[in-house]
Image (cartoon, rainbow, N blue to C red):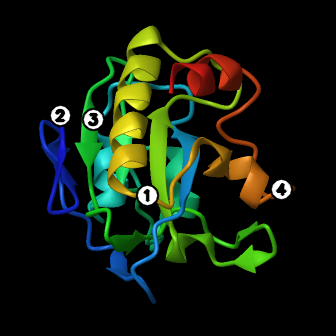
Amino acid sequence: MQIKQHRLTGAKWLESAFYNQRPNNEISLLVIHCISLPEGCFGLPHIDQLFTGSLDCSADPSFKDLQGLEVSAHLLINRAGEVTQYVAFDKRAWHAGVSCYQGREGCNDFSIGIELEGTDSSEYTKAQYQGLIEVSQLLLKHYPKLTKQRIVAHSDIAPGRKTDPGEHFDWSAYLEAL
């Protein structure tokens, strides 16, 4: 894999409509998230559908609150370690919501969001860590303002509102591998 024109070669591309231009070209934060739809169910098409605006919110009772939600991430790494990209890295994906990093609000403006298929309370797979490490190394090399010290959990930038990627995410192994 490599990054060409702000897209990851070798990743599945499913363009989301839920993005816009960054207010500047700065990419200086990497945010790790997790998602599953329905929660705890893996390998289903619902995440792709959510990020591309085609989720049938009547398909599961837990989707009721997702009606009309416009959300995206730059990348999703599924349980098998496969990567899907929804938004080019130079665009602002809508992943962080109300957020603040080191006193700076609106983290979507300057961050890349990576979703791991999982839950706050589940273990992640070896394949997901391998994929995340490979992608993170590419991002660190390609975007010089990104550093290991500027990789955070969604819970770090939205405390009290978000808890992902959760207590089972192995930060020390991940960061050491970078």
Q: Disc 2 and disc 1: Cα gap in Å?
A: 18 Å
Secondary structure of the residue carrying tag 3 is strand
Look at 50% across and 52% down and name the residue there: 63
Which circle's residue, 4 or 1, is located before the other in the chain? 1
Earlier in the chain: of badge 2 and badge 3, it is 2
Which of the labelled discs sits on residue 1, or is there none?
Answer: 2
Q: Earlier in the sequence, mark 4 or mark 2?
A: 2
**Residue depicted at x 43% and y 57%:** 144
Q: Nearer the viewer, residue 120 or 24?
A: 24
In the rendered image, is residue 37 in sight? Answer: no
Q: Are marks 2 and 3 in contact (CB under 8 Å)?
A: yes
Q: Which residue is mark 1?
A: 144
SS at mark 2 in the image: loop
Q: Nearer the viewer, residue 44 or 164?
A: 164
What's the residue type where badge 1 is placed? Pro
* Residue 102 placement: quadrant: bottom right
- Assign the N terminus to one quadrant of the image: top left
Q: Earlier in the sequence, mark 2 or mark 1?
A: 2
Residue 9 at what x, y percent from top left?
Answer: 13, 43
Is residue 100 visible to us here? yes
The answer to which quarter of the image holds residue 101 is bottom right
120 on left or right of 90: right
